Image: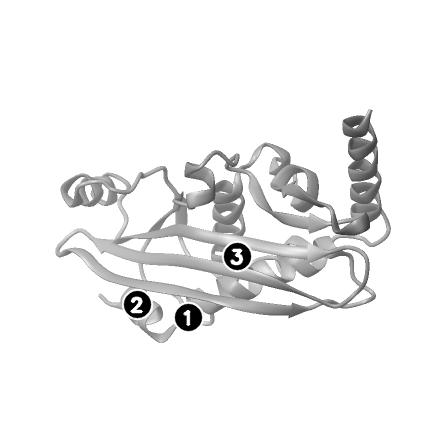
Amino acid sequence: MIYKLKMVFVSSVLLMLVGCVSPIPLAEQTPSPDYLPPNKILLTVNDQRTRVFDGKPDDFVGVAHGSFGIPFDWHVGTVLATEDGDKERNLAEFLEHRISTGLNSKGWDTEVVAIADPMDEGSITQTIQEKDAQKLLMINIHEWYFSINLNWVSAFNFDTDATVNIYETEDGKLFQKRIAGRDVIEEKADESPQNNILRAYRAQLVEIFSDPEVKDALLKM
């Protein structure tokens, strides 16, 4: 009986989450760099979160606190799905879709590929050659987690930790950098939690692609 009541509550919260305020358009969920690599870039996102290795599903994105502060898990399909196919995407696929959509809308030639890490550099450079690309951008997600309180509009923590790897055919691994931190996201009263989270996601992706070292490595000929 308690479980059923909890599920009814969660369902009601989710209806309020997505039903009261229209979701922001896809263009406002994606990074839009102001630079353009001269050749094709392959893209892959790998989920290396300890939470997932410890048993959380790969579409887990964070925790919401409802009545009496009781926490419950949120997932891509039930909270962040705004586009066709989102309900079937895990977090890595969700991020790949947003990144590739944003980059290609700015004129990039980007293709999503499935490449696990670790993988030997010989196989990676072979894939780059086979796809007629210049580089592979691999983003390994170690943390991508928020904890939000639904009882009032305030702020929520968004913790991220990702390693950016860039490979090319001639030198193998060209670049590696870890970008991590905690952002305190000030909620907007006229926005839904869904939109506040989607904007936080975009801000983190913008930070990655705005990093001067990432930019230089992607533009390097």
Work out how far the residue at label 2 is from the one at label 3, CA to CA, in angstroms: 17 Å
Give the residue number, with chain letter if any, for mark 3.
102
Question: How many numbered discs sit on the rendered protein?
Answer: 3
User: Is the residue 7 above or below the residue 218 in the image?
Assistant: above
Which residue type carries mark 3?
Gly
Give the mark, 1 or 3, whose residue is nearer the N terminus.
Answer: 1
The residues tagged by marks 1 and 3 sit, at their Cα atoms, a distance apart of 12 Å
The image quarter in which residue 129 lies: top left
Given the image, on which type of amino acid does mark 1 rest? Tyr
Left or right: 35, with 172 as reference point: right
Q: Quadrant of residue 183?
A: bottom right
Crowd band around label 2 with a 10 angstrom C-alpha radius: few (<14), some (14–19), many (20+): some
Q: Where residue 119 sits in the image (x, y, percent)? A: 22, 40
Residue in the picture at 61% in, 41% down? 76
The image position of residue 39, as x and y in percent, is 31, 57
Label 1: state its secondary structure. loop
Q: Classify residue 166 by image quadrant.
A: bottom left
Q: Nearer the viewer, residue 118 or 143?
A: 143
Q: Is residue 24 visible?
A: no
Residue type beneath disc 2? Leu
Q: Can the viewer see residue 55 in this picture?
A: yes
* Residue at mark 1 to residue at mark 2: CA–CA distance: 8 Å
Q: Which mark is residue 163?
A: none
Q: Dot 2 lies on which element? A: helix
Mark 1 — residue? 35
Q: Which residue is mark 2?
A: 219
Scheme by which the image is coloured: one colour
Q: Residue at x 49, y 61 (%)?
A: 205
* x and y percentages locating residue 219 in the rendered image: 30, 67
